């Protein structure tokens, strides 16, 4: 136990939150694999109170930086921590018991801040408590599922994609972390001494938990609470960049799911630009939503160079992108169907489905290009033919859809064309009496494509 209290003393002397947080981590450091076992073996259920009290109030308190009430609150924290470690290092840990024991660590910390005046520099301890509370809750629910009591899915991108099911402990963990959020956002101390420095980390932890629970509406409440308090918070750029990148990512995904693609793209782009260049998995997660956003807002596809470092994204978006570029409607439908389970899992299916309009735009553009040029007037430059028979577009749609033997009614084709004009993917008008589409001249027929 001496090592833990030695680090506790050092952290108190230099006011180092990160160092202090290492004294309550449930994971042994790589250079001391037996640290947790040695810590637990250093006391017993009969003497833990007195051992911790001595370690905190005497052995570690030569140059105390905390009051007597703070000291007793820290004793509570480390007694709870000792009990939790006992559950964690068991030969076959009962994850429900681990969760309940670790929850007491989190609650002891919350009491320390709310009643005993723990200083703001110690906030990283809340990060550790909240992070592992969520992890142990997921493990407890998974264990319950194995016993037939709950459902858990721990696949790729578990935060955003988690399956809906009974997550009793995770729901309970969300309530505890929400108390931590309230503890931070309600602090009225001067900013340099405020717990508000922990807001974005705690918010991100809530986002992860709510997404796992499929309770995205609760995430919106957190965003609104932050926006209401923004004037009383430190400036965003003063927070650790890692906190802001994660925050921007989740806000971007929330806006994406609300179909506010412009603002979603703004937040996701900010997350992409701020993300560390070596954080490959984070880049993938951001691009999973940024690519569909960009497709709808700019009608453009990611380049091969952008996707080259990400084989999974190439597999996910490559077939769709190729079909969109070619105007291959049948291929697009097949690629969308082939990837449906993955797209639905990541909540991007409906957004990608709208990419069919871009594929149709590119197909109709080919008809326009194949139409050639009108006979130029003497001395004038040649202009592309801008009066296209509806039947030519109908034939192209039949070919692109692999339905050459099926007749498309003119009304159906005109409806598709009118929809393209309405969405500003084509510029022009339909002359129903003459059965033609009159497109804009001067490189404006298909906006954004150069013609």
Image (cartoon, rainbow, N blue to C red):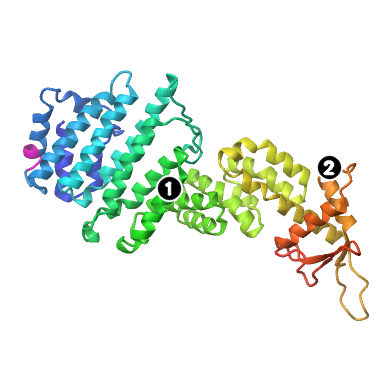
Ranked by sequence position, the earlier of labels 2 and 1 is: 1
* Disc number lying in front (2 or 1): 1
Q: Give me the residue at 34% from left, 35% from top.
A: 172
Secondary structure of residue under mark 2: loop
Tell which of 268 and 409 is nearer to you: 409
Can residue 58 be found in the magenta stretch? yes
Image spot of residue 96 (x, y percent): 33, 25
Whether residue 362 is situated above or below residue 350 in the rendered picture: below
Image spot of residue 286 (x, y percent): 51, 49
Q: Give me the residue at 11% from left, 30% from top.
A: 49
Q: Which residues are magenta?
A: 57-61
Image spot of residue 140 (x, y percent): 37, 27
Image spot of residue 318 (x, y percent): 66, 44
Q: Main secondary structure of the magenta part?
A: helix
Q: State left or right for residue 301 relative to residue 188.
A: right
Q: Which residue is mark 2?
A: 402
Q: Write down the quadrant of residue 170 in the picture.
A: top left
Mark yes or no: residue 32 visible.
no
Mark yes or no: residue 282 visible.
yes
Q: Which residue is mark 1?
A: 219
Whether residue 451 is situated above or below residue 394 in the rendered picture: below
Circles 2 and 1: CB atoms closer than 8 Å: no
Q: Quadrant of the C terminus?
A: bottom right
């Amino acid at each position: 136990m001496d090592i833990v209290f030695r680090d506790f003393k050092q952290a108190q002397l230099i006011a180092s939150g990160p160092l202090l947080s290492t004294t309550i981590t449930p994971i042994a450091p790589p250079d001391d694999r037996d640290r947790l076992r040695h810590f637990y073996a250093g006391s017993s259920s009969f003497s833990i109170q007195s051992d911790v009290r001595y370690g905190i109030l005497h052995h570690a308190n030569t140059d105390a930086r905390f009051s007597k009430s703070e000291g007793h609150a820290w004793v509570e924290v480390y007694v709870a921590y000792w009990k939790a470690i006992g559950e964690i290092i068991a030969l076959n840990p009962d994850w429900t018991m681990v969760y309940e024991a670790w929850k007491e660590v989190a609650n002891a910390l919350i009491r320390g801040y709310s009643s005993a005046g723990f200083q703001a520099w110690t906030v990283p301890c809340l990060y550790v408590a909240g992070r592992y509370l969520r992890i142990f809750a997921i493990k407890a629910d998974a264990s319950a599922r194995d016993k037939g009591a709950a459902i858990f899915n721990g696949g790729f991108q578990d935060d955003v994609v988690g399956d809906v099911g009974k997550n009793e402990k995770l729901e309970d963990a969300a309530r505890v972390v929400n108390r931590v959020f309230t503890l931070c956002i309600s602090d009225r101390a001067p900013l340099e001494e405020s717990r508000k420095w922990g807001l974005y980390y705690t918010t991100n932890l809530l986002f992860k938990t709510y997404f796992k629970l499929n309770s995205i509406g609760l995430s919106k409440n957190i965003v609104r609470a932050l926006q209401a308090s923004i004037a009383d918070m430190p400036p965003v750029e003063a927070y650790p960049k890692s906190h802001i990148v994660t925050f921007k990512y989740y806000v971007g995904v929330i806006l994406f799911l609300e179909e506010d693609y412009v603002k979603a793209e703004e937040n996701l782009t900010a997350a992409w630009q701020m993300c560390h260049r070596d954080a490959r998995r984070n880049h993938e997660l951001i691009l999973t939503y940024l690519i569909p956003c960009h497709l709808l807002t700019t009608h453009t596809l990611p380049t091969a160079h952008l996707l080259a470092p990400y084989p999974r994204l190439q597999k996910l978006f490559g077939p769709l992108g190729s079909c969109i570029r070619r105007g291959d409607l049948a291929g697009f439908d097949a690629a969308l169907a082939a990837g449906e389970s993955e797209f639905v899992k990541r909540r991007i299916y409906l957004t990608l489905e709208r990419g069919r309009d871009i594929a149709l735009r590119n197909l109709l553009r080919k008809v326009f290009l194949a139409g050639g040029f009108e006979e130029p007037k003497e001395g004038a430059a040649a202009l592309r033919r801008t009066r296209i028979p509806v039947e030519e577009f109908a034939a192209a749609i039949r070919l692109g859809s692999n339905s050459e033997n099926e007749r498309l009614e003119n009304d159906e084709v005109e409806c598709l064309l009118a929809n393209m004009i309405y969405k500003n993917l084509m510029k022009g008008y339909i002359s129903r009496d003459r059965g033609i589409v009159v497109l804009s001249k001067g490189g404006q027929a298909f906006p954004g494509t150069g013609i």
